[in-house]
Amino acid sequence: MAIRIVIALILSLLSAPLASPLTSPPAGATGSETTVVEPAAIATSPELAVTEIRVVGIDNDPVRSAEAQAVIDRFAEVGLELPPVTIQFHESTTACFGYDGLIRYVEPVPVIEICSDRPYVLPHELAHAWVDANLADAAKAAYVESWGLASWDGDEDWNDRGTEHAAFVIQQNLTASPATRSRTWRERAEAFEMLTGLASPLTPG
């Protein structure tokens, strides 16, 4: 069943600067996205329910709204139940420290900031939300060891961090064509199955 999107435009939230203690992007971040852990809370709608995905900033953009719904539906189609999260769309990369997107771990629910219309950004950030809501520390450690990564979320390069590897794997499995059967794609399917316990959408049949 598709998760209902609650569309809400909060002008004060869109115009205000992020309540973040960071003055520069974290070490090890790439030019495309990063993950920010932040204690401050943001204003959220009182009707937000635990099963809802709340989307802010695209109520006058039916194309992007439909695209966001399609991404959320894709997670449901493959059996990945997303946790409650607020998705905030922006017109520039300012809110994302110059990146295409990021996830902020705040109360009451994480906030995903989307600062680009590149199609991989939203599924990648939602993958972060799913992974962090579903993987225990032991599973994260096993994943790091299995794929020869440096750590789960240290200061290493993007490709050496388990959290980014895992989000990329889920993003790729949900958005790529299942026709390619190279070694790279077989490994991505295997990693997806290790993370989720589900058959990869890239696996034939």
Image (spheres, rainbow, N blue to C red):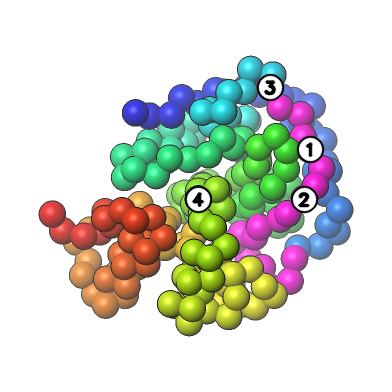
Between residues 94 and 147, which one lies in front from this camera angle?
A: 147
Residue that badge 2 annotates: 38
Counting other residues with Cα less than 10 Å from the Cα at mark 2, is it few (<14), some (14-19), or many (20 or more)?
some
Counting other residues with Cα less than 10 Å from the Cα at mark 1, is it few (<14), some (14-19), or many (20 or more)?
some
Magenta-drawn segment: 26-45
Magenta span has 33?
Answer: yes
Q: Secondary structure at mark 1?
A: loop
Mark 2 or 3, nearer chain start: 2
Residue that badge 4 annotates: 134
Which residue sits at x=31%, y=45%?
78
Q: Measure how far apart labels 2 and 3 are at the Cα level.
A: 20 Å
Which residue sits at x=35%, y=52%?
174
Q: Measure how far apart labels 3 and 4 are at the Cα level.
A: 25 Å
Q: Measure how far apart labels 4 and 2 are at the Cα level.
A: 20 Å
Decide: is 38 above or below 140.
above
Q: Measure how far apart labels 2 and 1 are at the Cα level.
A: 8 Å
Residue that badge 1 annotates: 41
Which of discs 1 and 4 lies nearer the camera? The answer is: 4
